[in-house]
Protein backbone atom coordinates (compact mmCIF):
# COMPACT_ATOMS: atom_id res chain seq x y z
CA UNK A 1 0.00 0.00 0.00
CA UNK A 2 1.23 3.46 -0.79
CA UNK A 3 2.15 5.85 1.98
CA UNK A 4 -0.55 8.26 0.80
CA UNK A 5 -3.25 5.57 1.19
CA UNK A 6 -1.97 4.73 4.66
CA UNK A 7 -1.99 8.42 5.67
CA UNK A 8 -5.54 8.76 4.36
CA UNK A 9 -6.71 5.76 6.40
CA UNK A 10 -4.98 7.05 9.54
CA UNK A 11 -6.59 10.47 9.07
CA UNK A 12 -9.98 8.80 8.52
CA UNK A 13 -9.64 6.72 11.72
CA UNK A 14 -8.60 9.81 13.65
CA UNK A 15 -11.41 12.03 12.42
CA UNK A 16 -14.26 9.59 11.74
CA UNK A 17 -13.80 6.68 14.16
CA UNK A 18 -11.99 7.85 17.28
CA UNK A 19 -14.73 10.34 18.28
CA UNK A 20 -17.05 7.33 18.81
CA UNK A 21 -14.68 5.48 21.12
CA UNK A 22 -16.30 6.88 24.32
CA UNK A 23 -19.75 5.59 23.25
CA UNK A 24 -18.33 2.17 22.44
CA UNK A 25 -16.43 2.09 25.74
CA UNK A 26 -19.63 3.00 27.62
CA UNK A 27 -21.46 0.14 25.91
CA UNK A 28 -18.60 -2.24 26.74
CA UNK A 29 -18.65 -1.16 30.41
CA UNK A 30 -22.22 -2.47 30.59
CA UNK A 31 -21.01 -5.80 29.21
CA UNK A 32 -17.63 -6.34 30.83
CA UNK A 33 -16.26 -5.97 34.33
CA UNK A 34 -12.60 -5.56 33.49
CA UNK A 35 -11.17 -2.30 32.19
CA UNK A 36 -8.32 -4.35 30.74
CA UNK A 37 -10.77 -6.41 28.67
CA UNK A 38 -12.32 -3.22 27.35
CA UNK A 39 -8.92 -1.80 26.49
CA UNK A 40 -7.99 -5.07 24.75
CA UNK A 41 -11.14 -5.07 22.61
CA UNK A 42 -10.68 -1.43 21.62
CA UNK A 43 -7.03 -2.10 20.77
CA UNK A 44 -7.98 -5.13 18.66
CA UNK A 45 -10.59 -3.05 16.86
CA UNK A 46 -8.00 -0.40 16.03
CA UNK A 47 -5.65 -3.13 14.80
CA UNK A 48 -8.38 -4.37 12.45
CA UNK A 49 -8.96 -0.81 11.25
CA UNK A 50 -5.22 -0.37 10.70
CA UNK A 51 -5.21 -3.47 8.52
CA UNK A 52 -7.76 -1.99 6.12
CA UNK A 53 -6.53 -1.43 2.61
CA UNK A 54 -9.47 0.77 1.61
CA UNK A 55 -12.13 2.85 3.35
CA UNK A 56 -14.23 4.10 0.46
CA UNK A 57 -16.81 1.34 0.99
CA UNK A 58 -17.50 2.44 4.59
CA UNK A 59 -20.34 4.94 4.63
CA UNK A 60 -20.92 5.01 8.41
CA UNK A 61 -17.62 4.78 10.27
CA UNK A 62 -19.20 4.80 13.72
CA UNK A 63 -21.33 1.76 12.87
CA UNK A 64 -18.40 0.00 11.27
CA UNK A 65 -16.27 0.57 14.38
CA UNK A 66 -19.06 -0.58 16.69
CA UNK A 67 -19.65 -3.69 14.58
CA UNK A 68 -15.96 -4.62 14.76
CA UNK A 69 -15.96 -4.26 18.56
CA UNK A 70 -19.24 -6.16 18.87
CA UNK A 71 -17.92 -9.03 16.74
CA UNK A 72 -14.74 -9.15 18.79
CA UNK A 73 -16.82 -9.30 21.98
CA UNK A 74 -18.94 -12.13 20.58
CA UNK A 75 -15.77 -14.03 19.66
CA UNK A 76 -14.39 -13.45 23.14
CA UNK A 77 -17.61 -14.73 24.73
CA UNK A 78 -17.71 -17.72 22.41
CA UNK A 79 -14.17 -18.70 23.41
CA UNK A 80 -14.58 -18.04 27.14
CA UNK A 81 -15.15 -20.96 29.51
CA UNK A 82 -17.55 -19.00 31.75
CA UNK A 83 -19.97 -16.70 29.99
CA UNK A 84 -21.65 -13.92 31.97
CA UNK A 85 -25.39 -14.25 31.37
CA UNK A 86 -25.79 -10.46 30.97
CA UNK A 87 -23.48 -10.49 27.97
CA UNK A 88 -25.71 -12.95 26.17
CA UNK A 89 -29.09 -11.55 27.10
CA UNK A 90 -28.72 -7.80 26.66
CA UNK A 91 -29.52 -6.44 23.24
CA UNK A 92 -28.98 -2.78 24.05
CA UNK A 93 -26.28 -2.63 21.40
CA UNK A 94 -29.06 -2.14 18.87
CA UNK A 95 -29.64 1.41 20.07
CA UNK A 96 -25.96 2.21 19.53
CA UNK A 97 -25.35 0.23 16.37
CA UNK A 98 -28.19 1.61 14.29
CA UNK A 99 -29.70 5.01 13.90
CA UNK A 100 -32.21 3.72 11.38
CA UNK A 101 -35.29 1.93 12.72
CA UNK A 102 -35.75 -1.75 12.06
CA UNK A 103 -38.79 -3.04 10.13
CA UNK A 104 -40.22 -4.23 13.45
CA UNK A 105 -39.89 -0.78 15.00
CA UNK A 106 -41.46 0.82 11.92
CA UNK A 107 -44.40 -1.59 12.11
CA UNK A 108 -44.84 -1.01 15.84
CA UNK A 109 -44.73 2.77 15.33
CA UNK A 110 -47.34 2.55 12.58
CA UNK A 111 -49.60 0.50 14.85
CA UNK A 112 -49.14 3.01 17.65
CA UNK A 113 -49.92 5.88 15.27
CA UNK A 114 -53.08 4.09 14.09
CA UNK A 115 -54.14 3.61 17.74
CA UNK A 116 -53.59 7.29 18.49
CA UNK A 117 -55.47 8.35 15.34
CA UNK A 118 -58.41 6.12 16.32
CA UNK A 119 -58.39 7.53 19.86
CA UNK A 120 -58.35 11.09 18.52
CA UNK A 121 -61.24 10.22 16.22
CA UNK A 122 -63.14 8.87 19.24
CA UNK A 123 -62.85 12.11 21.23
CA UNK A 124 -65.95 14.25 21.71
CA UNK A 125 -66.38 16.69 18.82
CA UNK A 126 -65.21 19.95 20.44
CA UNK A 127 -62.43 18.17 22.31
CA UNK A 128 -61.27 16.52 19.05
CA UNK A 129 -61.32 19.83 17.19
CA UNK A 130 -59.33 21.62 19.88
CA UNK A 131 -56.89 18.75 20.35
CA UNK A 132 -56.27 18.49 16.60
CA UNK A 133 -55.76 22.22 16.16
CA UNK A 134 -53.52 22.58 19.21
CA UNK A 135 -51.44 19.39 19.28
CA UNK A 136 -51.33 18.36 15.63
CA UNK A 137 -51.55 21.60 13.70
CA UNK A 138 -49.76 23.70 16.33
CA UNK A 139 -52.32 26.50 16.39
CA UNK A 140 -52.04 28.79 19.41
CA UNK A 141 -54.54 28.58 22.25
CA UNK A 142 -55.66 32.17 21.61
CA UNK A 143 -56.23 31.51 17.89
CA UNK A 144 -58.24 28.34 18.60
CA UNK A 145 -60.39 30.25 21.09
CA UNK A 146 -61.01 32.94 18.46
CA UNK A 147 -61.83 30.42 15.69
CA UNK A 148 -64.22 28.36 17.83
CA UNK A 149 -65.64 31.33 19.71
CA UNK A 150 -64.79 29.91 23.14
CA UNK A 151 -62.59 31.08 26.01
CA UNK A 152 -58.91 30.19 26.24
CA UNK A 153 -59.60 28.25 29.43
CA UNK A 154 -62.05 26.05 27.50
CA UNK A 155 -59.35 25.43 24.91
CA UNK A 156 -56.86 24.55 27.64
CA UNK A 157 -59.29 22.27 29.50
CA UNK A 158 -60.43 20.47 26.35
CA UNK A 159 -56.83 19.97 25.24
CA UNK A 160 -55.92 18.47 28.61
CA UNK A 161 -59.04 16.31 28.57
CA UNK A 162 -58.22 15.05 25.07
CA UNK A 163 -54.66 14.18 26.05
CA UNK A 164 -55.88 12.41 29.21
CA UNK A 165 -58.42 10.35 27.25
CA UNK A 166 -55.83 9.39 24.65
CA UNK A 167 -53.33 8.36 27.33
CA UNK A 168 -56.01 6.30 29.08
CA UNK A 169 -56.92 4.66 25.79
CA UNK A 170 -53.29 3.76 25.15
CA UNK A 171 -53.00 2.28 28.65
CA UNK A 172 -56.10 0.20 27.92
CA UNK A 173 -54.52 -1.15 24.75
CA UNK A 174 -51.41 -2.04 26.72
CA UNK A 175 -53.34 -4.29 29.07
CA UNK A 176 -54.69 -2.00 31.78
CA UNK A 177 -58.20 -3.42 31.55
CA UNK A 178 -59.31 -2.21 35.01
CA UNK A 179 -59.97 1.28 33.67
CA UNK A 180 -61.52 0.24 30.35
CA UNK A 181 -65.14 0.56 31.43
CA UNK A 182 -64.54 3.87 33.18
CA UNK A 183 -62.91 5.46 30.12
CA UNK A 184 -65.66 4.21 27.79
CA UNK A 185 -68.31 5.59 30.15
CA UNK A 186 -66.51 8.94 30.32
CA UNK A 187 -66.25 9.10 26.52
CA UNK A 188 -69.95 8.29 26.12
CA UNK A 189 -70.93 10.90 28.71
CA UNK A 190 -68.72 13.53 27.05
CA UNK A 191 -70.19 12.83 23.60
CA UNK A 192 -73.71 13.29 24.93
CA UNK A 193 -72.71 16.66 26.42
CA UNK A 194 -71.21 17.93 23.13
Image (cartoon, helix red, strand yellow):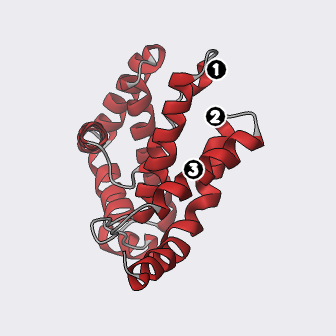
Q: CA distance from mark 1 to mark 3?
A: 21 Å
| Residues marked 1 and 3 touching at CB (< 8 Å) | no
Label 2 packing within 10 angstroms: few (<14), some (14-19), many (20+): some
Q: Quickly name the residue at label 3.
A: 44
Q: CA distance from mark 2 to mark 3?
A: 17 Å
In the rendered image, residue 110, in percent from the top left (x then y), is placed at 24, 42
Nearest the viewer among 157 and 96 is 96
In the rendered image, residue 10, in percent from the top left (x then y), is placed at 50, 75
Q: Is residue 48 above or below residue 57?
A: above
First of labels 2, 3 by sequence position: 2
Q: Quickly name the residue at label 1.
A: 84
Q: How many marks?
A: 3
> Under tag 1, what secondary structure?
loop
> Under tag 2, what secondary structure?
helix
Taking the view exactly as shown, the residue that stands out farthest to the bottom is 4
First of labels 2, 1 by sequence position: 2
Instruction: Please give the name of the residue rendered at 32% of the width and 48% of the height, measured from the top-left corner.
Output: 101
First of labels 1, 3 by sequence position: 3
Q: Is residue 154 visible?
A: no
In the rendered image, residue 194, in percent from the top left (x then y), is placed at 30, 44
Q: Is residue 20 above or below residue 7?
A: above
Please tell me the numbered disc located at residue 31: 2
Q: Residue 129 lies in what quarter of the image?
A: bottom left
Label 3 packing within 10 angstroms: few (<14), some (14-19), many (20+): some
Q: Is residue 14 visible?
A: yes
Amino acid sequence: MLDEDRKRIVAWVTSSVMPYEPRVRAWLRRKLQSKEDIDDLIQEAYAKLAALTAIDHISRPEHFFFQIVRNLLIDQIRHARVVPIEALTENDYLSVSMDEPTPERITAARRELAKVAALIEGLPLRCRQIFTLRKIEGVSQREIARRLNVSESVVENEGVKGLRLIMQGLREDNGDNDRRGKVRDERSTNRRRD
